[in-house]
Image (tube, grey):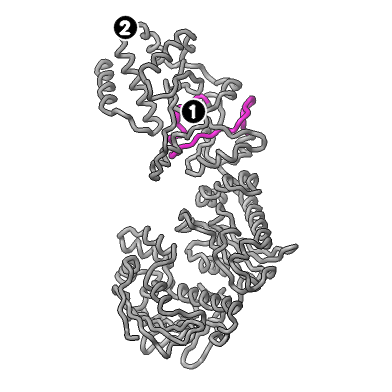
Amino acid sequence: MTQQTIEFKAEVAKVLDIVIHSLYSNAEIFLRELISNASDACDKLRYALLLHPELAADAGTFQITLTPDKKQNILTVTDNGIGMDRDDLINHLGTIARSGSAEFLKSLSGDKQKDMALIGQFGVGFYASFMVAEKVVVRTKKAGSDKGWKWESTGLGSFTIEEDDKAPHGTAITLYLKKDMSEYTDPLRLRHLVRQYSDHISLPIILENNGTKETINSASALWTRNKTDITNEQYKDFYQSVSHAFDAPWMTLHYKAEGTITYTGLLFIPTKPPFNLFQPDRQSNLQLYVNRVFISDNLPDVMPHFLRFVTGVIDTNDLPLNVSREMLQKTPVMSKIKNGLIHRILSELKKRADKPDDYKTFWDSFGIVFKEGLYEPIEQRADVADLCRFYTLNESGLISFSDYVAHMKPGQKNIYYITGSDLETLRHHPQLEGFAARGIDVLLLTDPIDEFWVQTYSDYQGKKIVSALHAREDLKEVKPTGDTLEKPLEKELADETLARFKDVLGTQVKDVRLTDRLTKSPIALITAEGQMSLNLERLMKAHGQQTAFSSERIAEINPTHPLIHKLASLIHDKKESDKVADSIHVLFDQALIAEGEPIKDPAAFTRRLSDFMMSGL
């Protein structure tokens, strides 16, 4: 086949344009990415040999070789792994298939200096080569194939591909380095980078220089070593390699579980959230090994979704080496490993939770995801609840469910919450005035998941978790501190006032009723129990999920407020009928504003408000 020129897909061209035309201070990351890819290729062939032993002719001792050529300013990275055929080259090197790379594209700002920092954060795999190389040549032959291929590109819009009879089994990537990148032909520099970023790689990394060969990494799986022999720096380097991250791990968990199931776990919780934490298809970056043979990094049934930020390695001898993905989903071994992982992670988090400032770092990064554990059908929901933290009406810092219960008022039977999008807005929500007057605390929930877990996790240690918007019982049992604004309206006058509100507001509300939840505001809105909250309705509309119906609003009136008393006194005055109606409309629109809801007739609201200001002046 003759040489063929193929255009890069648009998203690859965009990445390469940034790489080639910007200055990047951490260009050295390219070597970590290429070595990681080479290690994956060897792992894939080693696994393939279990199912297809005939491929052994293409294998040999798995290793990765770095060959610098100082005179020609060239560095070659070679592996004897699975290799690639023509379709693989086009699919892997001509398009961005990896979800992390696609997410990278969404994060581009247009500011090249900032975008280059993103490339360091995301890695972007093979394309990092163009940070240091003006031309990249890939020569490869796939295991089991007798046909080799050559791929070549300068990163400027296209690449060429052609057959190559001399291509080695596996893959050889040759980087024709830029003039100012000659440091990557220096053996000392290469040794340093391998020990910094790739020392944990379980394959030998060979430095071949002037005919001599030297293994420059430890070439043993880090998780198999004794914990006392591993430094924090080595743990950090391993974490950064498996997670493609630049932060240090917030928590490192290295242990061996022994019993009916034996496995080793080396797990990490990052300090900062992974870039794709909220992608719908995001899974935990957890790798499964069987007797140090890589099996899979796609384990949706092993780590629950609310712990998807956990990364690391699981290695067990209690599975057959030829285990398939279908078997993984069915075997009870994986179910037992899953329960063991959850238990161990939650136990370690409980230890760290005793240090509030330290735990706040974790909660600020992952609390929004961790709370999904209150929604997921898992056995450990009570343990998850103990580890959750919340901002509240009465406290400035984060507190636990246990803290909340310990500070409940005498006569208070329930745990109360309110949902919204902004913490300070919730602190001043009209419906919380009655709670503040009584010193009753309220959980302030501002994450989207909060709208869902409160529907399924409704009890903590015998205390019901209840919306503050539907509280009745405790507000009657707990007396308010301080004086009310006025005495409540007499029943007959109150009924007449409510009837006037209903008549003026018409179908805009389902009902109008008196409440003791308000102490400073004259009116506030809620939805009926069992209906979608106003906050959830807004969230769904913001994500393009228009509901089949809108929740019906209920207007709650404060019978002690002077303004309500004044309106009540004018109910029977026919001369003031229009003014009363206008006042009710303005009060309703103000209640909508307080809820973050749009006013249906802004022009009418502006006119009425201007009239009241004129009469007042």
> Please, what secondary structure does the residue beneath circle 2 have?
helix
Residue 545 lies, in percent from the top left, at 41, 43
| Range of residues picked out in magenta | 406-434
Q: Residue at x 51, y 33 (%)?
A: 393
Q: Residue furthest bottom?
A: 211
Residue position marked by numbered label 2 in the rendering? 574
Residue 247 lies, in percent from the top left, at 49, 61
Residue 124 lies, in percent from the top left, at 41, 68
- Say which quarter of the image contains residue 481: top right
Amino acid type for the residue under numbered disc 1:
Ala
Q: Residue at x 55, y 49 (%)?
A: 370
Residue position marked by numbered label 1 in the rendering? 528
> Which is nearer the eye, 406 or 291?
291
- Say which quarter of the image contains residue 85: bottom left
The quarter of the image holding the C terminus is top left
Amino acid type for the residue under numbered disc 2:
Lys
